[in-house]
Image (tube, coloured by chain):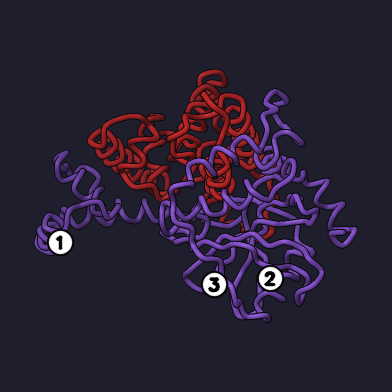
Chain colours: A purple, B red
Amino acid sequence: MNKSHDISDRDLEALSQFIDGELPESEAKALRQRLLAEPGLRAYFESMEAANNRVRAAFSGAELEAVPDHIAAALAAPGAASAAGGNRFSWHHGAVAASVLAAAVLLVSPQWGADPLDEATLASVLDSAPSRASGWEALPGGDAVRPLLSFRSVEGAYCREYLLRSGDSAQRGVACRDGQSAGGWTVQVTVAQSLPGGVSDYRPANSYDVDAIADYVAEHAAGDVLSLEEEAAAMSRGWQ
Amino acid sequence: MRALSYSQRQDLLSELGSLRKFCYSLTGNAADADDLLQVTVERILEKGMPEDASAIKWAYRVCKNAWIDEVRSREVRQRYPQVADEANDHEPSAERTAGGEREIDAVSRALQGLPEDQRLALLLVAVDGKTYAEAAEILEVPVGTIMSRIARARKNLAQALEGRDD
């Protein structure tokens, strides 16, 4: 590239916005035509785009998103495994507050009548995979599950919250161990999640939906989220 | 400020991987990235956040501020060759070829040469996939400022990368 080529600030910003997909379409259209007609501008664009691609590629790779367990644990259950050591608020406090907010909100129906095969497959992951902040446990058929946390219900059963990814859609749910259904876990409540952009970027499909989970937890959970140690101990006892 | 709500905590747990990638892009090596992530989580737990705050944007903001504190205290610009030496020591990634490591070094060096405000804006958008509006909220500046910082970052970066490749 001709390094002494000068570019106006306005063109520079337009190219940059164009690369980020933030240029309004009418301006993008005009810019595309200019890129065809002006070799100097096009050369600058290609140079910027090449640099952008190198930055993205240099920081791609799943290992960059690997979160140390103790950090995830501190966030999931600060009372049990605090990294900071100073903040012993009750996990219930947040859950109760969320349920108050959810009082005026529509609940999403749980996925009753779920395919028993699906539940058995999900159950095998809930049986044996520790909670995690990133990454997935693969299921047959290309689906994937991420157990998020575990707690005991007021009925004395172990329950786990999880993310389930299937193709382009995802759902967040809570399942509890009952020893009765196929596989031993019964899904109690699920909400749809949308998948904008990257794999690790989950949002509720509806801004009210996430409260259905919080509402369930507020009503049924006894005590704090299990620490990773408590969870591992429960798992080794077969969730008894 | 009140402690995190259940929803805020769940949002954060889902985003921890992306936040860790942001930490890596800022620090250039795995060990420092983990430290920065830990400090970020500790500060969030310690101080809480407003009830209506978006947990994810808040977390990026806390992380950015923790990083700026770290930069000021370590004077990283003088010491940034850590990328070449310590990065290779701290993370023996079996998947990366020698060429891959050189490329990350080259890109990291070029990024480290940028003014911090340009680098932060560029990384949030180009690496972490934030929109200009989200980046503006995280960095607490107007969107126009984000646009010009990113544009200048790209211009400087392209020059730095091409200069190094000669």
Label 2 neighbour load within 10 Å: few <14, some 14-19, many 20+: many
On the image, the x and y values in percent for residue A35 come to: 15, 60
- Mark 2 or mark 3: whose residue is earlier in sequence: 2
In this rendering, does residue A182 appear at all? yes
> At 83% across and 52% down in the image, what residue appears?
A232
Kind of residue indicated by mark 1: Arg
Q: Nearer the viewer, mark 2 or mark 1?
A: 2
The image quadrant of residue A183 is bottom right
For residue A210, the mark is none
Q: Name the residue under label 2.
A: A122
- Mark 3 or mark 1: whose residue is earlier in sequence: 1
Kind of residue indicated by mark 3: Ser
Q: Which of marks 3 and 1 is in front?
A: 3
- Mark 2 or mark 1: whose residue is earlier in sequence: 1
> At 68% across and 81% down in the image, what residue appears?
A117
The image quadrant of residue A76 is top right
Q: Nearer the viewer, mark 2 or mark 3?
A: 2
Q: Mark 1 points at which residue?
A: A32
Q: Which chain carries label 2?
A: A
Q: Name the residue under label 3.
A: A166
On the image, the x and y values in percent for residue A100 come to: 51, 41
Q: Distance between the residues labelled 2 and 1?
A: 48 Å
Kind of residue indicated by mark 2: Leu
Q: Which chain carries label 3?
A: A
Q: Is residue A61 left or right of residue A204?
A: right
Asked if B50 appears above or below B25 in the picture, the reply is above
